Structure formats: structure tokens, C-alpha cells
Amino acid sequence: MTGITSYPKEKIRILLLENIAEDAVKQFERSGYTQIERWNKSPAEKDLLKAIRQVHLLGIRSKTQITEQVLRSAKQLLALGCYCIGTNQVDLRSAGLMGIPVFNSPFPNTRSVAELVIAASILLLRRVPEKNTAAHAGIWMKKAEHSFELRGKTLGIIGYGNIGMQVSVLAEALGMRVLYYDIETKLPMGNARQIHTLRSLLGQADVITLHVPGDASTEQLLDKTTIAQMKKGAVVINYARGKVVDHEALAKALRSGKLGGAAIDVFPVEPFSNGDTFQSVLQNIPNVLLTPHIGGSTEEAQKNISDDVTNKLIQFLEYGISSGSHSVPALHLPPQKNRHRILHIHQNVPGVLSEITHKLAAEKINISGQFLNTNNLIGYVVIDVDKNASATALRSLKTVKNTIKTRLLY
């Protein structure tokens, strides 16, 4: 099976925004796609509404907001790729109800973030940021007071997911004692130990690093109350989401000496573009590292993300595979020789699959392969039929009640 889609590849329009890696363009080209636009920025919504009307595949990163209005303007859109970890910037419910799968890449930059967490831990414990600032100002600050080795210290990881686990392995290799807190029971890596209350973890850790999602349950997870529960002199690292730390409370704890330092890479409000003005209450506090959301920004990570998301988009377009989608149910299915494949996305209500079967039976169409998966809103069924029956089957499936989208794949 060559993966010939119902659209000639030269007619499929692909738009990549926010300076997505050039590797994505090359990967699409190797697969036979030629109409590829790559923009270096995230456009204003009015420009996006215009640009997206005839686009079949859209690639974004974290800044472009894909609202219901944007999706409704994308009349030809078949799939959306988020070339980043999260999908918070996309209205996933609307995407699902329009039959548009949304893919992301949650794993490829975990190593980049984990390495930077370890680097920040060493720099903060050695109080390098303030000594660096002093040296640039012409002041010689050579002293060992309040400067510590990483080895033998306790690392407290809040959120033991993919990144938290990698941080755990690296930290233990450097001689740290690793504790972690997670709302779910997680098997430890190495000798790490799960702590079942946040308060207990905060009271033991010399270094606290956050790796939690950004939602209502984690907003201001570290606030005045929880910061008060930390050890005196502890350092805080947040490379997760901007709103999980109360920056006012953190700044007060740093200035008072309650905390020994902080490294912050994500902020409640971030500048839209490079070069824009940036302000934070954490500026100009000694032993604080502020970085512009670069936790996963390495060339290796960007290439890995590019390869991962581009592959998912191509797999869906050419085979109907939706594994990794956040809006359309996941299906992974093998191609069948000498068959045509039809995709049918519908509202998840009783009777749809029965109607599909009856309509095809009425046309005396034999189903050689059928795959179905559902979520709360959407049902996704893939049907393989004889080549000479595919046109009739497609016409019949378009008349099924509660159909959202159907197309002949090959």
C-alpha cells in the first residue's frame, strides 16, 4: 500500500506557523507534498482566519490560539499538529465536533527540560546567579558561605510524569536523594520514593521542582501557605506552567531569606514575540534565574518534535491512523491490499454503527475490515471495502444521521 490519499498530494495545502523546524518541511516533501508554507511568526487572528480557509494541514506551536471561530473558517482542514508539548491553545472540543484530529508531541523534549532543571539546581545551590551579576558589575564575590554541593541534597519533584521521571534519574546519578509527590500512585525510577502529602515533601526538600499540567487544580499550587511549609533556604524551580506558582508570594519569600533561590522559565503572562518588553516581580532579586520559556528549546528537541508531529499528520492523512489525537478517538490500523478505505467521523450517539452496517448491506457491499473507537463526543470508524464498491459506499455513508465528516482515503 503506497498511501495514496483521496486528494492528490500536490493539491494538499500545508501551513506551518511560529517558525516550526525546517525538518518538518523536508519530511513532508519526502512524502510527496509540495504546497507547504512556513511562517516565522504567529499571525493575528484576522490574518489567520484568512490564511486558513483553504489549508488541509495546519502546524502551530504554543502561541497561536485555535478558537472555534478559527476552526469554522478552516473549511478544508483535515488535521492540526501542535509542534509542542501542550494543546491548551486549541479548542479541543470544537475540533472534535468538527472531526479534526489534534496531535501534539508530549515526549521528545523531556530530556531538554530535565537537563536544564539539573543545571539550575547546581547553579542555585552554588549561588552562581548573584555571583555572575556581581562579576559583570566589577565586584569580586569569592566566598563559600551558603554555597552547597548537589550531592547529598534532597530533591522534591512535584508531578512524576515523563519529565519528572527523567529529572529523577539524572538527580540520583549525581548523588541526590529523590522524593516525589503525585496525585496518582507511580512506580519509582531507581531509588526515588513517593511521598503522599505535598506538605511532607515540601518540608524535606532542599530543591523543589514542578512538573505539573496547567489547570484549575494546579493554579498557585505554590502560594503563601505552601511556601511557608518549605525548608529555610530551599530553592524552587518551575519549568512547568506559569500559573502554578504565586510569584508575589515567591518574591516575598526570596527577599526575606525564607527561600535561597529560584529558577523560573514560565510566567503567568508572557510576551507575545521576541524583543517584546518583559516584566516580573522576580526581577533584580539575588540568586534568581529567569529564562524566557526555553525549557524545551534545544535543536535536538525541536527536531524530535518536528519528526514526531509531522509523522502523525502524515499517518492520519494517508492511512487514517489517529493514535495520539486529543480530539478524535485513537485508531491504529493496518492497510489492506486491493481495498479502498473510508473514514467516517460522527457524533457518539446510539445507532450510528448499526445504520452504517445496514446502509452498506442494502447496497450489497462487503466489509473486509472495520475499526471503531469512541470518546464522549465523537465516534470514529474506518471501513475497508472492495475497490469497485467504494464510490457507492461513500455516497451511502454521507447520508448516515449524525455524520460529521467522511472521506475516501484511498
Image (cartoon, rainbow, N blue to C red):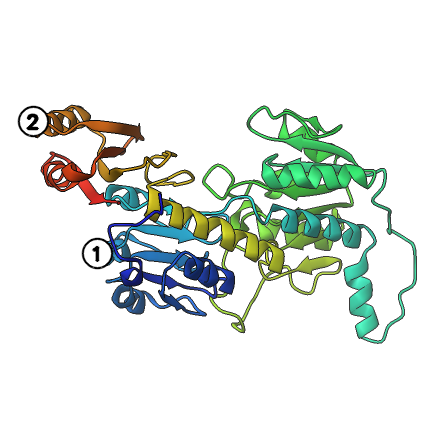
Q: Residue 390: x, y in percent?
A: 17, 39
- Left or right of 83? Residue 244 is right
Q: Residue at the spot x=37%, y=40% of the render? A: 322
Q: Which residue is mark 2?
A: 362
> Distance between the Cα atoms at labels 2 and 1?
31 Å
Q: Residue at the spot x=54%, y=48% of the render? A: 241
- Left or right of 249? Residue 390 is left
Where 141 sits versus 106, above or below?
Answer: below
- The mark found on residue 367 in the picture is none
- Left or right of 232? Residue 383 is left
**Numbered disc 1: secondary structure:** loop
Question: Residue 295: which quarter of the image?
Answer: bottom right
**Numbered disc 2: secondary structure:** helix
Q: Residue 244: x, y in percent?
A: 55, 45
Q: Residue 109: x, y in percent?
A: 59, 49
- The residue sitting at the bottom extreme is 138
- The residue sitting at the right extreme is 143
How dense is the environment of label 1, judged by Cα within 10 Å: few (below 14), some, or many (20 and up)? some
Of the pair 172 and 15, the residue shown nearer to us: 15
Q: Which residue is mark 1?
A: 75
* The C terminus: image quadrant: top left
Asked if the residues shown at circle 2 and circle 1 are in contact, with their CB atoms under 8 angstroms apart, the answer is no
How dense is the environment of label 2, judged by Cα within 10 Å: few (below 14), some, or many (20 and up)? few
